[in-house]
Image (spheres, rainbow, N blue to C red):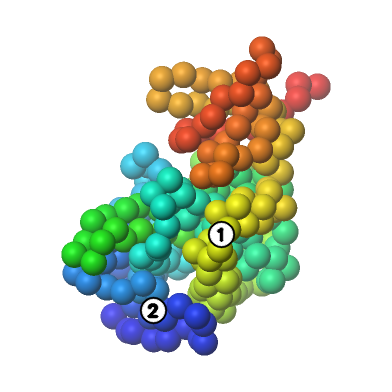
Amino acid sequence: MMPAEAGTQNMNFEIKSFDTLESTNTEALNQARNGAGEGLCVTAHEQTAGRGRYGRSWVSGKDAGLFLSVVLRPKLEPVYVPLITLMTGVAVHDALAEMGVISDIKWVNDIHVDGKKICGILAETTETDAGLAIVVGIGLNMNSESFPPYLAASSTSLAEELGRSVSREELINALTRHMDKFYAILTGENGPAAIVEHWRQRSSYFEGKSVRAVMERETIFGTTAGLEPNGALRVAKSDGTIAIIQAGDVEQLRAVI
């Protein structure tokens, strides 16, 4: 484990790097419960039990990607906590743009490049002696050669998009710098509305996209119609009503030719 500073930023970032962990989110949650302050970043070269939303597994082979989890202790009204995921998506989008990769934010927690997934985000909460802590995990594909065959057609990586490798240090610096910027916006005056607007500018899913939203008890078809103030997706159905999607799997419906 090697602590290090990740550049000059408003938040006091501290990087704790491991060779192997079950999950960087699990380690960061434990660190938060043990008193870790805001800005602690846990990263690993490999995860043996990486996970995505709804407990799904996340492919985390050695040095295949950047697996990074950040401890946050935001002063936010509870209703706006879901915006942490959207804020992180905006930060990842801009970090990729800085490197020359044009991406799209798929509601609610994936980053795509030309329809292929390059990054997933998972935010989890825990109660601590110092109050609520949120751990936001970022899994960003760095190399494609380690993808299993079933992911090759639907996923991409930094190396594939750029035609060159990117160092972990360069990527961590870019991600933390942009996360610092947008976290300050989120927790500032009129922050939730500002993050929704930043997200709108960066996502084709904000409005006018035909989608299928699969939730626990129903599946909805319709057209995206913006976000609620807390980041929930608005979907206009064919009967003219608006469905509010707080959580679920949203997939683009492609035209049949």
Name the disc covering residue 9, or none.
none
Q: Is residue 202 visible?
A: yes
Is label 1 in a helix, a strand or a loop? helix
Label 1: few (<14), some (14–19) or many (≥20) C-alpha neighbours in 10 Å = some
State which quadrant residue 44 falls in. bottom left
Residue under label 1: 191
Q: Position of 20 compared to 223: left or right?
A: left
Q: Quadrant of the C terminus?
A: top right
* Residue type at the position of mark 1: Gly
The relative height of residue 38 versus residue 8 in the rendered view (above or below) is: above
Q: Position of residue 46 (x, y in %)?
A: 37, 65
Residue 15's label in the rendered image is: 2
Question: Where is residue 66 shown, x and y percent of the image?
Answer: 47, 66
Determine crowd level at label 2: few under 14, some 14-19, many 20+ residues with C-alpha closer than 10 A.
many
Q: Is residue 92 visible?
A: no
Taking the spot 49% from the left edge, 64% from the top edge, the residue there is 187
Q: Nearer the viewer, residue 19 or 35?
A: 35
Q: Locate residue 134, reporting x and y percent.
A: 35, 58
Q: Secondary structure at mark 2?
A: strand
**Looking at the image, which residue sits at the far front?**
189
Q: In the rendered view, would you say 141 is above or below 39?
A: above
Indicate the quadrant where residue 133 lies. bottom left
Type of amino acid under label 2: Ile
Q: Residue at horizontal 35%, vertical 52%?
A: 124
Task: Between residue 47 and residue 31, name the one nearer to us.
Answer: 31
Separation of marks 1 and 2 at Cα, in angstroms? 26 Å
Q: Is residue 205 left or right of residue 15?
A: right
Vertical position of residue 157 compared to residue 57: above or below: below
Q: Position of residue 45 (x, y in %)?
A: 39, 69
Mark 1 or 2, nearer chain start: 2
